[in-house]
Amino acid sequence: MKILVVGGGGREHAIIRKLKENPTVETIYALPGNGGIAADAVCVPIGAKDIEGMVQFACKEKIDYAVVAPDDPLALGAVDALNAEGIPCFGPDKKAAVIESSKVFSKDLMKKYGIPTAAYEVFTAADDALAYVKTCKIPVVIKADGLALGKGVIIAMSREEAVSAVESMMLQHVFGDSGSRVVIEEYLEGPEVSVLSFTDGKTLVPMVSSMDHKRALDGDKGLNTGGMGTIAPNPFYTKEVAAECMEKIFLPTIRAMAAEGRPFKGCLYFGLMLTKEGPKVIEYNCRFGDPETQVVLPLLKTDLLTIMQAVTNETLSETQVEFSDGACCCVVMASNGYPGNYEKGFPITIPAQVQEQVYVAGAALKDGCLVTNGGRVLGVTAAADTLREAVDAAYANVEQIHFDGAMYRHDIGHRALEV
């Protein structure tokens, strides 16, 4: 089989590595891929948002199956365009991807179908939003309506921060058109949990739970990032919590999307907050999370391509999906200055003995050598029988890797180990 994977980050590297385990897979093409993915797939310099180029390539190469991983091409209708040419895909169509591409849509969906989430208000005029944050309860959460590379959410701990957040989104347009509408919602407290799930629009199978670490610095300090590391499973996500989430959140969401004429097929990500009142949805993503994928897929025992094809063919109920009982940890090694300004082009040294445990996110090949080419550069992982062993092994791997200006958190998994 010829497989096409759209995207070029650590998440895509993890997906490609897992797909390679299927013996029927002959060639995997990555659009555009990156310097590290090039070791596992044929990288093609077509951007993930170049839908026309993607479809032309897929037709020319007679691609048997495509996996559209990032949010942007899903929201732009990449799956619709590939399906129109008879190429089966893993990922939601444009109508279903709106569950992530519009936070207003997702909040209104939850309200309409009684899915627990934070109370919220929607604003299209900056003056109205500013007037609201000057009197609302603080802390408060301000979200740009559209996609913003995972950075369109600001948790304002003071009124000044809330005003600044609204001004940056609605007046300064730091997220472009994504900030023309904002959702302002109550600040929820409790442990956060990420749950990725396979769904064919009727059946939903949750994956192993995980815990992301969004802040740039140790102790959950510093700016919000795309994610500085993850662990799986999340110890706060007990069997009792899982059962409640399935009954009150997961299945109702799938049914709600079907009822709206937007059946969701692919990977639906639930960002949850375990509050004193019970689990509530913080956000939906219409795709695999990053870096959650890097700790969830190493624990998957069932063949990934088989599951993905079952999702496409709507036969997920007939497919057994198994995960190992172990644990996994991912530590993100980033460029100094991330998520702000950073330099690129520094050579990366990864010893051969740890290469299979490293997912490459922001790196390029220069004269045959891997060099830094992004904010988040590497996801350094380790799987083990226990979380303690996985965390220790991941950091042992980190210590063997080098590039100038490497920065990473030293406390990934520490909160989970205290449970």
Image: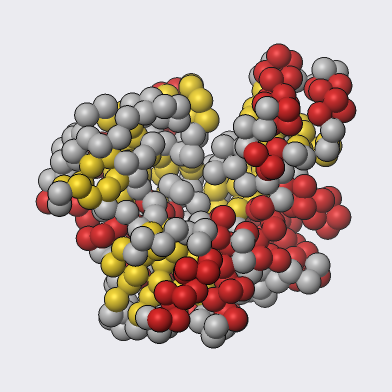
Q: Is residue 217 visible?
A: yes
> Which x, y percent locates residue 287?
55, 58
Residue 268 sits in which quadrant?
bottom right
Residue 167 sits in which quadrant?
top right
> Which x, y percent locates residue 364?
27, 48
The number of callouts visible is: 0
Q: Is residue 312 visible?
A: no
> Which x, y percent locates residue 166?
73, 26
Which color scheme did the rendering employ for the protein? secondary structure
Q: Write the residue at 41% across / 67% down.
A: 5
Residue 225 vs residue 51, the one in the foreground? 51
Q: Which image quadrant: the N terminus?
A: bottom left
> Which x, y percent locates residue 399?
19, 34
Name above or below for residue 383 compared with residue 68: above
Q: Write the residue at 80% across / 55% down.
A: 109
Q: Write the residue at 50% across / 52% down.
A: 289
Name above or below for residue 400 compared with residue 163: below
Residue 174 sits in which quadrant?
top right
Residue 199 vs residue 182, the one in the foreground? 182
Residue 283 placement, left or right of 90 = right
Name above or below for residue 170 compared with residue 304: above
Residue lying at the far left in this picture: please name it. Answer: 352
Residue 302 vs residue 186, the one in the foreground? 186
Q: Write the residue at 37% across / 51% down.
A: 10
Residue 329 placement, left or right of 245 = left
